[in-house]
């Protein structure tokens, strides 16, 4: 599994997110995800709920790491970023631009986006807890494309999709379908209307 390239698709931004400020979404755009206190953009939340339910029926837990691993306010993004990065050049391969400076990832930290640029700030990203069951990642990835459950429900990885890339995060999924509803999500919502939080 470690060497299978992760599918990477560009994020289609839903129309009602095109004019909002990253990390400053109105509550009306966000919905709680089932079995968790985290929130996502309403279309992404419905897709996540469908995916999580399918995993549950397959005996695999697909849950966010924490509340902050769904939608993140700008303040949360900045707080996380300032804990993980430094302006001192430590030779890190992972860098970000913020406030007209180059920031270097502090060793031992997971990468995060510069504040105001994260897909978490649009409610389109969720970090999945891969530590409670080793099968979770295998279920999400499948064979990488044809049987990729994450992709089937509208979620994709980011960057190069290469697990050897220092910026790669296996746990970080983005909802990439914009205003469209993937077929697997539509089928799940028809069978279980309570999952539809749009």
Image (tube, rainbow, N blue to C red):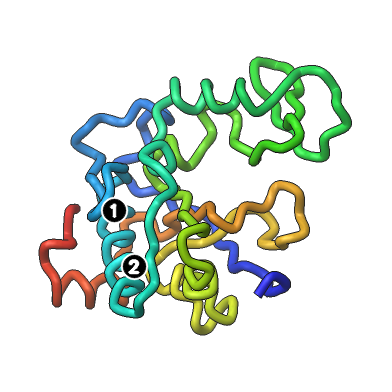
Contact between marks 1 and 2 (CB within 8 A): the answer is no
Which quadrant of the structure image shows residue 10? bottom right
Q: Earlier in the sequence, mark 1 or mark 2?
A: 1
In the visual, does 65 lie left or right of 186? right
Residue 45: numbered disc:
1
Which quadrant of the structure image shows residue 30? top left
Decide: is 171 above or below 19: below
User: What percent of the width, then of the height, locates residue 195?
Assistant: 18, 62
Number of marks present in the image shown = 2
17 or 70: nearer the viewer: 70
User: What percent of the width, then of the height, locates residue 142?
Assistant: 53, 79
32 or 156: nearer the viewer: 32
The residue positioned 77% from the left and 59% from the top of the image is: 164
Label 1 Cα neighbours within 10 Å, binned few <14 / some 14-19 / many ≥20: many
In the visual, does 166 lie left or right of 76? right
Label 2 Cα neighbours within 10 Å, binned few <14 / some 14-19 / many ≥20: many
Decide: is 86 above or below 14: above
The residue positioned 76% from the left and 34% from the top of the image is: 107
User: What percent of the width, then of the height, locates residue 18?
Assistant: 38, 39
86 or 13: nearer the viewer: 86
Could you tell me which secondary element the residue under label 2 belongs to?
helix
The residue positioned 39% from the left and 28% from the top of the image is: 73
Could you tell me which secondary element the residue under label 1 belongs to?
helix
Residue 131: numbered disc:
none
User: What percent of the width, then of the height, locates residue 7?
Assistant: 59, 68
Which quadrant of the structure image shows residue 4? bottom right
The residue positioned 65% from the left and 75% from the top of the image is: 1
- The residues bearing labels 1 and 2 have C-alpha atoms spaced at a distance of 10 Å
User: In this view, which residue lies farthest toward the front?
Assistant: 132
Residue 51: numbered disc:
2
């Amino acid at each position: 599994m470690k060497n299978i390239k992760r599918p990477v698709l560009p994020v289609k931004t839903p129309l009602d997110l095109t004019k909002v400020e990253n990390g400053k979404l109105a509550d009306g755009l966000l919905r709680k995800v089932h079995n968790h206190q985290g929130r996502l953009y309403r279309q992404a939340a419905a897709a996540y709920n469908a995916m999580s339910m399918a995993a549950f029926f397959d005996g695999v837990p697909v849950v966010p790491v924490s509340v902050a691993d769904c939608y993140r306010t700008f303040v949360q993004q900045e707080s996380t970023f300032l804990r993980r990065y430094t302006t001192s050049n430590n030779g890190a391969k992972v860098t970000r631009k913020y406030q007209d400076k180059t920031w270097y990832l502090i060793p031992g930290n997971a990468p995060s986006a510069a504040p105001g640029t994260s897909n978490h700030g649009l409610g389109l990203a969720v970090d999945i807890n891969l530590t409670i069951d080793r099968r979770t990642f295998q279920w999400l990835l499948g064979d990488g494309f044809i049987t990729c459950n994450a992709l089937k429900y509208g979620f994709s990885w980011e960057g190069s999709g290469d697990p050897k890339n220092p910026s790669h995060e296996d746990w970080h999924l983005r909802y990439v379908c914009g205003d469209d509803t993937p077929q697997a999500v539509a089928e799940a919502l028809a069978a279980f209307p309570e999952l539809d939080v749009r």
